[in-house]
Amino acid sequence: FSIETELRRALDRDLLDLFYQPLVDLKTGEVTGFEALARWHHEDRGEISPTEFIPVAEESGLILTLGRWAMDRAATTLAGWDAREGETLPLYVGVNLSAIQVARDDIAAMVAGALRSSGLSGERLTLELTESAIVQDPRRATRVFDALKALDTTVAMDDFGTGYSSLAYLQRLPIDVLKIDRSFVTGMMIDPDSVAIVRAVLSLADALGMATTAEGIESRELATTLAALGCSSGQGYFFARPLAAEDAIDYWRSRQ
Ligand code: G
Ligand code: G
Ligand code: MN
Ligand code: NA
């Protein structure tokens, strides 16, 4: 069977899983939230990477189903942690939204639905959008971003610096967080140009009143350097890999 056929079946049977990678405040070391990342353990083929099945989902339109599933699962999981700990936890969850979802689905209604059924308030959710979501249809993107802000959710620009959007959109759209793409963060260790780019992005974000998250932090040295440069938040294997829901909340508790 093709990956598409198998993916359709996996979605029908609820065989995908959602993992959670901690985001850490680089000043205090506190875990502030998690990014939700889809995982697919295929019974015969083993682990299939999202870099393989997300593009298939996007080409086939299955991303609409997958995206709604991820949104609902992430919200339900966070509400479940609150219920188990008996309090509203100081944690948020970030959900990736594909440009295809922005173009073809009613994102704001979907997010509102997930908030309603989980009972979470909007501040508990971050929506991670890529520059491609803006480039395809800027007017639609503007409406979607505004609607997400009206729900009090946080809007993050994912993989920042790798796409083709103009800086004018940073000014025009209600973006709260710039996520600095992993390629620049990894590059900092070996390439002075990457350091220059990261510095420039941090300074731009600061001037525009946006927070910053560095992705792909794999060493203590990088975490320290990025903190010194003023980056607010970090994510990467140095802190933790994406974790199953149970392991993610255990990780948070163990660091309290
Ligand atoms: O999880 P990493 O482990 O391999 O993810 C690879 C890529 O797949 C990343 O670009 C990530 O944003 C994307 N991805 C993972 N889960 C989701 C999801 O639920 N929705 C969308 N749109 N992209 C996802
Ligand atoms: O594009 P997006 O930012 O959503 O993708 C997140 C991807 O980055 C996931 O595939 C996740 O597993 C991966 N990732 C997270 N932290 C690290 C890291 O420290 N190193 C590497 N190589 N990949 C990471
Ligand atoms: Mn992301
Ligand atoms: Na990224």
Image (spheres, rainbow, N blue to C red):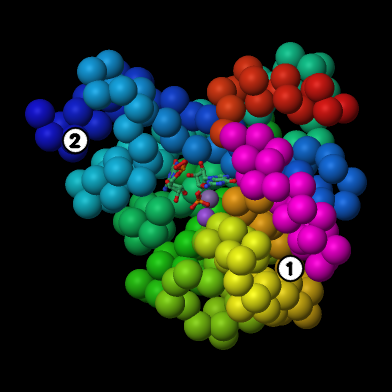
Query: Residue at 60% across / 51% down in the picture?
Result: 216
Q: In this picture, is 46 found above or below 156?
A: above
Is residue 229 in view? Answer: yes
Give the structural element (helix, strand or loop) at label 1: loop
Query: Residue at 50% across / 48% down in the picture?
Result: 96
Q: Is mark 2 within 8 Å of ligand 1?
A: no
Query: Residue at 75% across / 78% down in the picture?
Result: 203
Q: Is residue 199 left or right of residue 54?
A: right
Q: Position of residue 210 (x, y in %)?
A: 73, 68
The range drawn in magenta is 218-241
Q: Position of residue 87 (x, y in %)?
A: 83, 23
Q: Quadrant of residue 222?
A: bottom right
Q: In this picture, is 118 found above or below 131?
A: above
Residue hosting label 1: 210
* Nearest to N terminus: mark 1 or mark 2: 2
Query: Residue at 53% across / 62% down in the picture?
Result: 183
The three-letter code of the residue at mark 2 reads Ile
Q: Position of residue 233 (x, y in %)?
A: 75, 53
Q: Is mark 1 within 8 Å of ligand 3?
A: no
User: Which is more toward the observer, 116 or 29?
Assistant: 29
Q: Is residue 149 left or right of residue 68?
A: right
Give the structural element (helix, strand or loop) at label 2: helix
> In the image as oriented, which residue stretches furthest toward the front?
190
Label drawn at residue 139: none
**Residue 221 inside the magenta-drawn segment:** yes
Ligand 1 visible in quadrant: top left
Is residue 201 in view? Answer: no
User: Which is more toward the observer, 247 or 59?
Assistant: 247
Residue hosting label 2: 3
